Image (cartoon, grey):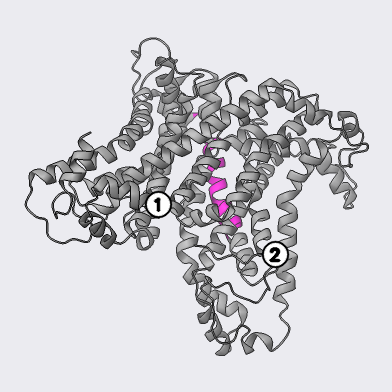
C-alpha cells in the first residue's frame, strides 16, 4: 500500500531515489525517505531469500564443522578442529583433492585449447551454422544424470562402445572403462570433456563475434598468414572470454559432483572420488554432518582462494570489481 | 546479442545485424584469390564434433526401441524388430508422471521466482543511488563463490527441522536463492542501459516509480528476462544434488532423481532404463531448441560452470 502512495507522491519531482545519471544529491526530504522505503521494498524479497538459503546455510556449515554431530539431537559435542585434522590426514580425502586438482589442470590444458581451436575454425560462414551450434551444445543441456546414465549404459565390458571399437578394428581386450581404477579417472575426464566442451566452444564463438573482421582483413592485406592473424590479433581480443571461461571451468571442476556420482559413485577404490562426492558420502550417507561440513568448508575455502587470486591477478581488467571491490 | 546465420541463408551473406556487415563487397578479393582449404576442414571438424556430441543421445533413443534380449545379443545393433513396449511402459508408469509434474512445478516456480525477485533487486541496484548499493551488489555477486555443495548439508538439517523434507518448496526456495547471483549479474547492466530520459518522461507524465517499473521497464527488459529465465529453467530441470537430498523417495522426486532410482531398481531391464532415460532428456532438448539463441546469448553474461 505504501508503494502506491509513494509512487504518486514523488511523481514529477527530483526527490526520492535519484536516477543513476543525475549528479549531486538534493538534501534528504520526506519524499526521499519514502523513496528509500520503496527501494528496500524492492530489494527485500531477494535479500531475504538469499540470506535464508545461501548465507545462513554456509555460515551453519562453518559452525557444524567444529562439532561431532550426526544431524540429530543437540549440537553439544564441540571437538575443535578435529574434523579438519581428520579430513586433511585421510588419504581418501587427499586423493579426492588431488583428483579435483588434476581435473582443474587437465580441463584448462586440454579443453581450453581444443575449444579455442575448434571455435576459430568454425568462426567462418558455414552452411547450417545454427544447426552445428545447436548440436555441439546438446551435451551441455542434458542433465548430468541423463548423460551419466547414457555413458554407463554404453561403457560396460563387451557393451556397445566396445563393439564399436571392435568394428573399427580393435580386436583385442578393451580396458574396463569404469571398473579399472587406473582407467576410470580418464574415462571420467573424457565424459566431462564431452559434457562441457560444447559450452566452451559456444562461449568462444560468442566472444569471437565481438572481434571485428576488419582487423583480420587488414592483417591479411599486410601479408599475415591465417595463423599469424589468429595468434596476434584474434586471440588477444578473445582474451576476456578465455579468462572468464577458465574461471568458470576451475570453479566447476572443484565442485564436480553429479556426473561422478552417477557414473562411478567415486569408485572403483576411490579412484574417481571428488571432494563433493566424499562430502555427500560422509555427510549424507553416513550421517556425519559435522565431518561432512568440515569437508564442505575446505572445499569452499579452496574455491574462494582460487577465485580471489584469479580475480586479483587475472580478471582484474575484465570484471572491474564485479565479485569483490578493488 | 549473437548474430546467427539461418541454415537456409547463403553462406557468404552476412546478416544485417552481424558486426561483419560490409556495405561494399561481401567477398573481399583477398579471400577470393585462391581456394580456401579451411572451409572443408571446418566442415569436417564440425561433422566429427556433432557426431561425438549426438552419438550417445541417438544411442539411447534408438536402443529404447529394442528389447533387452536384442541388446544383450548385439549391444551395438539396430532395432529388429522395433519394440515400443519400453516407451509405453514409461508412459504408463505413474511414478514417471508424478516426477514429470514435480520437475515442471519446481522448474516453473524457480524460474518465475528468480526472475521476479532478481529483476526487482536488479532494478534498484542498477538505477538508484542509495546507501549500501555497492555493498548489496557485491553481496549478491559474492554468491557466485558459495557453491551449493557447501550449503547442502545445513539446508538438509534446516529444512528437516521445518518439516519440509519431501515438500517441493524445500527445493524451490534454495534453487531461487542460488540462481539469484547469476540473474542479478546479468540483469543489472541490462537495466542500467535503459535510458534515464524514459524514466524522466514517465515521471513527468505522472507515473510513479512503481508504475514506471511495471509498465515501462519490465516490457523493455523482456530479452534479458527471457535469458535469465531460460538459464534458471534449464538449471532447475537438470538439478540433481538438491532434489536427491531434500525430496527422497520416487513418489516425491523430480525426474533426474527418478531416472536414477529407476535405473537402480530395474538394472536388469536395460531396454526399460534406456527408454526412461531418453524420455527424461526430451523436455530439456525440446526447450533448448526453442530457446537456443537466448541461452547462447545469456552465456556471454555469466553462467555457473
Q: Position of residue A172 (x, y in %)?
A: 89, 45
- Nearest the viewer among B100 and A226 is B100
- Per the image, is A110 magenta? yes
Please indicate, yes or no, whether residue A114 appears anywhere in the rendered image. Answer: yes
- The residue where tag 2 is placed is A128
Find the distance from the CA under tag 2 to the CA under tag 1: 33 Å
Q: Position of residue A260 (x, y in %)?
A: 61, 36
- Nearest the viewer among B201 and B122 is B201
- The residue where tag 1 is placed is B219
Residue furthest top in the image: A73
Q: Tag 2's secondary structure?
A: loop
Residue lying at 33% horizontally and 25% vertically, measured from the top left: A63
Picture quadrant of residue B201: bottom left
Q: Position of residue B181 (x, y in %)?
A: 39, 44
Which disc is residue A254 wearing?
none
Q: Tag 1's secondary structure?
A: helix
Picture quadrant of residue B114: top left
Residue lying at 40% horizontally and 49% vertically, measured from the top left: A307
Residue lying at 37% horizontally and 47% vertically, measured from the top left: B184
- Nearest the viewer among B79 and A181 is B79
Please provide the residue range marked out in magenta: A90-112
The disc numbered 2 marks a residue on which chain? A
Q: Is residue A53 above or below residue B35?
A: above
Please indicate, yes or no, whether residue A174 appears anywhere in the rendered image. Answer: no
Amino acid at each position: 500500500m505504501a508503494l502506491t502512495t509513494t509512487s504518486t507522491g514523488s511523481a514529477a519531482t527530483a526527490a526520492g531515489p535519484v536516477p543513476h545519471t543525475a549528479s549531486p544529491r538534493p538534501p534528504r526530504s520526506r519524499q526521499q525517505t519514502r523513496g528509500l522505503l520503496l527501494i528496500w521494498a524492492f530489494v527485500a524479497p531477494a535479500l531475504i531469500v538469499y540470506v535464508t538459503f545461501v548465507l545462513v546455510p554456509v555460515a551453519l556449515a562453518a559452525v557444524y564443522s567444529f562439532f561431532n554431530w550426526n544431524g540429530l539431537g543437540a549440537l553439544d559435542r564441540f571437538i575443535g578442529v578435529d574434523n579438519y585434522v581428520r579430513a586433511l590426514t585421510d588419504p581418501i580425502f587427499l586423493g579426492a583433492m588431488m583428483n579435483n586438482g588434476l581435473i582443474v589442470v587437465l580441463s584448462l590444458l586440454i579443453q581450453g585449447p581444443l575449444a579455442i581451436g575448434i571455435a576459430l575454425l568454425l568462426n567462418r560462414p558455414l552452411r547450417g551454422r545454427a544447426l552445428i551450434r545447436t548440436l555441439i551444445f546438446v551435451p551441455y543441456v542434458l542433465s548430468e544424470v541423463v548423460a551419466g546414465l547414457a555413458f554407463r549404459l554404453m561403457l560396460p565390458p563387451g557393451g556397445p562402445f566396445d563393439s564399436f571399437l571392435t568394428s573399427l578394428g580393435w580386436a583385442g581386450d578393451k580396458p574396463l572403462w569404469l571398473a579399472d581404477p587406473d582407467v576410470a579417472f580418464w574415462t571420467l575426464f573424457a565424459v566431462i570433456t564431452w559434457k562441457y566442451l560444447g559450452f566452451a566452444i559456444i562461449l568462444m564463438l560468442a566472444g569471437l563475434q565481438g572481434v571485428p573482421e576488419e582487423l583480420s582483413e587488414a592483417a591479411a592485406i599486410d601479408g599475415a598468414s591465417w595463423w599469424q592473424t589468429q595468434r596476434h590479433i584474434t586471440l588477444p581480443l578473445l582474451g576476456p572470454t578465455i579468462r572468464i571461461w577458465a574461471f568458470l571451468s576451475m570453479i566447476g571442476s572443484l565442485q564436480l559432483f553429479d556426473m561422478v556420482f552417477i557414473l562411478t559413485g567415486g569408485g572403483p577404490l576411490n579412484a574417481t572420488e571428488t571432494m563433493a562426492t566424499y562430502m555427500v558420502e560422509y555427510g549424507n550417507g553416513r550421517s556425519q554432518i559435522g565431518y561432512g561440513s568440515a569437508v564442505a568448508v575446505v572445499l569452499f575455502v579452496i574455491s574462494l582462494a582460487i577465485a580471489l587470486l584469479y580475480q586479483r591477478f587475472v580478471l582484474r581488467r575484465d570484471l572491474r570489481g564485479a565479485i569483490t571491490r578493488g | 546479442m549473437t548474430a546467427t546465420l539461418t541454415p537456409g541463408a547463403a553462406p557468404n551473406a552476412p546478416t544485417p545485424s552481424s558486426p561483419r556487415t560490409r556495405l561494399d563487397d561481401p567477398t573481399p578479393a583477398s579471400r577470393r584469390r585462391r581456394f580456401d582449404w579451411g572451409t572443408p576442414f571446418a566442415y569436417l571438424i564440425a561433422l566429427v564434433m556433432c557426431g561425438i556430441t549426438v552419438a550417445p543421445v541417438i544411442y539411447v533413443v534408438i536402443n529404447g526401441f529394442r528389447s533387452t534380449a536384442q541388446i544383450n545379443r548385439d549391444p551395438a545393433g539396430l532395432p529388429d524388430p522395433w519394440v515400443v513396449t519400453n516407451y509405453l511402459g514409461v508412459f504408463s508408469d505413474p511414478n514417471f508422471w508424478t516426477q514429470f509434474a514435480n520437475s515442471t512445478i519446481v522448474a516453473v516456480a524457480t524460474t518465475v521466482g528468480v526472475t521476479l525477485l532478481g529483476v526487482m533487486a536488479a532494478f534498484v541496484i542498477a538505477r538508484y543511488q542509495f546507501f549500501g548499493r555497492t555493498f548489496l551488489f557485491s553481496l549478491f555477486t559474492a554468491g557466485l563463490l558459495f557453491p551449493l555443495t557447501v550449503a547442502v548439508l545445513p539446508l538438509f538439517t534446516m529444512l528437516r527441522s521445518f518439516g519440509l523434507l519431501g515438500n517441493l518448496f524445500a527445493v524451490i526456495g534454495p534453487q531461487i536463492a542460488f540462481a539469484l547471483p547469476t540473474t542479478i549479474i546479468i540483469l543489472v547492466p541490462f537495466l542500467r542501459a535503459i535510458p534515464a530520459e524514459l524514466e524522466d518522461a514517465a515521471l513527468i507524465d505522472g507515473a510513479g516509480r512503481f508504475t514506471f517499473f511495471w509498465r515501462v521497464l519490465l516490457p523493455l527488459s523482456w530479452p534479458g528476462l527471457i535469458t535469465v529465465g531460460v538459464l534458471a529453467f534449464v538449471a532447475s530441470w537438470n538439478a540433481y544434488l538438491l532434489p536427491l537430498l531434500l525430496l527422497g523417495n520416487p513418489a516425491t522426486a523430480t525426474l533426474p532423481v527418478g531416472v536414477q532410482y529407476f535405473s537402480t531398481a530395474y538394472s536388469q531391464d536395460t531396454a526399460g532404463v534406456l527408454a526412461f532415460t531418453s524420455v527424461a532428456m526430451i523436455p530439456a532438448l525440446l526447450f533448448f531448441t526453442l530457446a537456443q539463441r537466448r541461452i547462447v546469448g545469456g552465456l556471454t553474461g555469466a553462467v555457473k560452470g
